[in-house]
Every structure is written in structure tokens, then in C-alpha cells.
Image: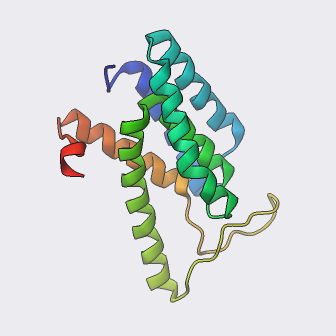
Amino acid sequence: MELISIPLFWGCVIPSTAAAYTDLKTYRLPNILTIPILLMGIIYGIYNGHWQASLLGVTAALIAGLPGALLNQLGMGDVKLMAGVGAWLGPFNFMVVLFISCIMGVLWSVCRVVKQREIPRAKVLPDANTPVSPNVIAFGFCLCFGLWTFILLSLMNINLFAII
């Protein structure tokens, strides 16, 4: 499977960037942004004959994201965005993106703790009108940052598996 392709760019990277912007501004990832990324990734995997890699990428994302969502540390929109990125990249490349994203999330959280001198609490947003705690980070943005970093490093022919 060709890693960097035009369908990947238009079907995953650009929509994920729009989702990251939305998450950064509202701390929500609506289904209208996440579900199409997931569906297009699975359909593209079937079209290319790499449906196993797409489904394994979705599975890896669900295994990685659902425990955090069940513990109120991630929103389900984050999990669906992770599943969409996993569908496009497959399990191994998705895990590299997730690794980069988690590093970004940890750095963001540490900066917030240092700035506010307060330990972050669980992300609980009962409805759209509830104000967001200043300790919450937008993990969708971190995931998109990880995706862009992965794409750029891949374009520079840097093998992240050899580094990690």
C-alpha cells in the first residue's frame, strides 16, 4: 500500500484537520466530521484490496481508545477519529501516529499544569452548554498533529519504526 497518496490526503488528512480545528475551538468532535473519515477509510481499503489492514487499524484504534473513553479521559469523538485514522493507515502506522499524538498530549497537559498549578481532572462534558474546564485538552488536535508529523516524516523518508 502506498503510504502517501492523494486519496489519503483528501480523505483523511484534510478532514482530520477540519475535525482538529473544531475540537480545538469547541472541545467536541461531531459525528458529521468523524464518521465520514472512518467510512471512507474502510471503503478505500476495500477498493484497494487492503481491507484487512483497514479493519485491523480500526480495531487497534478501538482497543487503544475505548478504555480512555470509558474512564472519561477521552470523548467518543476522539475514539471515532482515531478509528478513522486507523482505517486509512492500518494498525502499524496508526500506532506510530498514536505515539506521536500521546507525546503531544502529555506535553500539552504538562504545560497546562505548570501554567495553572493544578492537576487536570477527567473530561466530562454533559451537554453543549457546559463550560469546559481549563484543564481539558483537545486530543483530536493532538491526533491531527501526530498525523501531520507522521506524513511529513514519511515524505522525508524517515522510518519511525527504526527510531521507536
Residue 144 on image: x %, y %: 46, 46
Residue 118 on image: x %, y %: 55, 87
The figure's colour scheme reads rainbow
Residue 40 appears left or right of 160:
right
- Residue sitting at 32 percent across and 42 percent down? 150
Classify residue 106 by image quadrant: bottom left
Quadrant including the N terminus? top left
Is residue 27 at all visible to an observer of this figure? no
Give above or below for 156 relative to 77: above
| Residue lying furthest bottom | 117
Q: Nearer the viewer, residue 83 or 15?
A: 83
Give above or below for 146 relative to 111: above
Residue 132 on image: x %, y %: 69, 69
Q: Nearer the viewer, residue 58 or 153?
A: 58
Residue 147 on image: x %, y %: 40, 42
- Residue sitting at 52 percent across and 14 percent down? 46
Give above or below for 43 relative to 152: above
For the image, the number of numbered tags is 0
Q: Nearer the viewer, residue 44 or 116?
A: 44
Q: Nearer the viewer, residue 116 or 106?
A: 106
- Residue sitting at 56 percent across and 59 percent down? 138
Give above or below for 154 relative to 125: above
Residue 4 appears left or right of 141:
left
Is residue 40 at all visible to an observer of this figure? yes
